[in-house]
Amino acid sequence: MTSAAASGCPRCGAGLARGQEYCLECGLRVPGPGRFGALPIEPRHLLAPLAALGVVAVAGAALAIWATHEPDRTLDVATATGGSVAVAAPEGPSEPAPAAWPADTDGWTVVLLSVPKVRGRAVALQAARDARAKGLQGVGIVDSSRFPSLQPGYWMVFAGRFTSEPEATSRLQRARGVSKSARVQRIAS
């Protein structure tokens, strides 16, 4: 027990309990170990243990790098940066191309499916083929990044081009027989 704790507050003389950090009478912070205790060693004595921990950390990092190192290989990384590039169709018999939304044309359609571009255009093409096989007319694919009225980054599989929302809505029930998530969408350029 420190002398300050035994005799009381150095400012006002009020009694202090063991480990009390502040005087309850005058608010003075009482010198001494406080509630967390005194530092066990001086900061300069921490230098050697901290240096040893640093050496262990560096050795551990070096070991981790060595353990996970792979031989040098050249990898080609493809990055999609938005937009689309038309690719020529393969030679030979082919099915009809999906309908395209005409540039500078506003209208309404029924969106059957929105496929994130990272999944690829092939997924959207297959969905369009499936919809045509189930009897839907005017099925096509639109790149949502090319129209300001659409959220960019998707291949949207659509069915039909309509001049009004009611006309598109009238085809919604048939489209939901093919895709339960079908919805009416306005496309504006």
Image (cartoon, grey):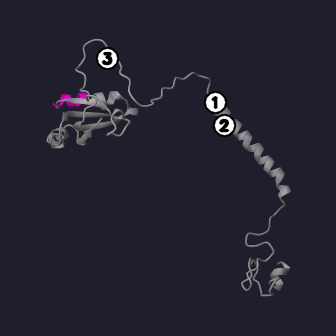
- How dense is the environment of label 2, judged by Cα within 10 Å: few (below 14), some, or many (20 and up)? few
Residue 82 pos. (x, y %): 42, 31
Looking at the image, residue 101 lies above or below residue 12: above
Where on the picture, by quarter, is residue 87? top left
Secondary structure beneath dot 2 equals helix
Secondary structure beneath dot 1 equals loop
Query: Which residue does the numbered mark 2 point to in the structure image?
Result: 64
| Residue nearest the observer in this picture, 52 or 84 | 84
Task: State how many labels appear.
Answer: 3
**In the image, residue 134 lies in the stretch drawn in magenta:** yes
Whether residue 74 sits left or right of residue 26 in the image: it is left
User: Residue drawn at (20%, 33%), measured in percent from left and top?
Assistant: 161
The answer for how far apart the CA atoms under marks 2 and 3 are is 48 Å
In the rendered structure, which amino acid carries the disc numbered 3? Ala
Looking at the image, residue 116 lies above or below residue 25: above
Mark closest to the chain's N terminus, 2 or 1: 2
Whether residue 178 sits left or right of residue 59 in the image: it is left
Whether residue 149 sits left or right of residue 96 in the image: it is right
- Mark 2 or 3: in front is 3
Query: Which residue does the numbered mark 3 point to in the structure image?
Result: 89
In the rendered structure, which amino acid carries the disc numbered 2? Ala
Mark closest to the chain's N terminus, 2 or 3: 2
Secondary structure beneath dot 3 equals loop
Q: Which residues are magenta?
A: 127-135
Where on the picture, by quarter, is residue 185? top left
Query: Which residue does the numbered mark 1 point to in the structure image?
Result: 69
For the C terminus, the image quarter is top left
User: Residue drawn at (20%, 37%), measured in percent from left and top?
Assistant: 178
